[in-house]
Image (cartoon, grey):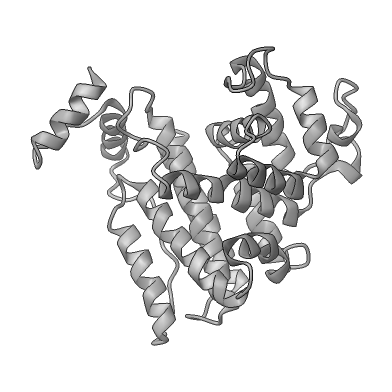
Amino acid sequence: MNFQKTRVDIHNNYPEKILFKAELEFIKRLEDKGLNVIFSPIKLQYDEDASFQVYLSHYIDGLNTLPFRPDQTFDNNFKVIDDAGRAIFPRGGTKKVLEELSNKLSINQNLDWQNIIDILTENIPLMTCRYITKNIFEAHKDNSFEGRKFQDRIEKCLGKVEYAQLLNQFPSTPTPASSPTSLEHLKSASSFMRLYLKGKKTSQSNKCYPSKLDLSKASNVLSHAKRFDILISLFLYTMRNERAHGASISPFITSKSTFKRYESYYFAMLCSYIFSLGVLSLRGFAGLNSSNILDCCRENVKIQKHFFNS
């Protein structure tokens, strides 16, 4: 398939439908599983608050794109995080929301939210870890204003020393500064990131790793709040910026698109949905609380595992 020509044809021959490989694989899996949807929204109580009704409209717009466009559902979920969060943190914009939300939700003290973070990070797709890791590793090569801001976010989430040791542990190949991170090191670093995000102490020390990355030391294990911060700031916010600024191609109509890409976007959609519900719970909307948000998280992880892993 000539993907460039096919995209032109899709545009010129609208509304005729041409499906790409990943889309066909996704449809076949739906048929094989006998499913129409692979998402179960939380049950909301009636709430006539005007702001809540705006956020509800975003959710509905997102739901109407499923099951085929979880990326667009993600976009609508993040609108809720952004706008509802700004009402809680009126000074500092989205940056303030990202920096303060874990503390406002009392993630290190609230057992429900700790369970939510454990469930999400235990089931994070490797492709998602690769996305996070690639952005982390390539940020230090970007000296633009936006690149430096992203580096600041990384250092706040990981720690300055931890970030430096991570870069040294999995160095890029000795090529020009603008070149992509080597595939070999990206795979190794992604596997480490997946383990790192689980927040578990390992039984044996790995002497190959520098001091701050040795997960046999309890002091190096990420707290629930840190893991939340990485997910919302280095994963969801980065994806939102790429999509909002038009910097990335639509994810399912490229030569690199595979069925597994749907898994990563469904995970992003779920994280953004769960975190947006957390923001609305802080606003006191629709009977939302950490307990029913946890139930929703459990149910949807179960649905996604059934669909993508078997």
Position of 31 with respect to 173 (left or right) is left
In this rendered view, identify the residue nearer to me: 239 or 226: 239
The residue lying at 46 percent from left, 66 percent from top is 80
Position of residue 190 in the picture relative to residue 58 (left or right): right
Q: Is residue 203 left or right of residue 246?
A: right
- Please give the name of the residue rendered at 87% of the width and 36% of the height, measured from the top-left corner: 212
Residue 193 is situated, as x and y percent measured from the top left of the image, at 69, 34
Q: Nearer the viewer, residue 298 or 44?
A: 44
**Residue 140: x %, y % from top left:** 68, 32
> In this orientation, does residue 201 appear?
no
Residue 28 vertical position relative to residue 245 in the rendered view, above or below: above
In the image, 41: left or right of 268? Answer: left
Placement of the C terminus among the 4 image quadrants:
top left
Q: How many marks?
A: 0
308 shown above or below 168: below
Report the front residue among 119 and 209. Answer: 209
Toward which corner of the image does residue 75 lie, by quadrant?
A: bottom left
Specify the farthest residue to the front.
144
Quadrant that contains the N terminus:
top left
Whether residue 68 is visible: yes
The image quadrant that residue 249 belongs to is top left
Occupied quadrant, residue 59: bottom left
Q: Nearer the viewer, residue 277 or 289?
A: 277
Name the outermost residue toward the top.
Answer: 174
Q: Furthest-bottom residue in view?
A: 48
Measured as percent of width and height from the top left, residue 201 is found at 83, 40
Q: Residue at x 54, y 46 (%)?
A: 238
In this rendering, the answer to whether 1 lies above or below 57 is above
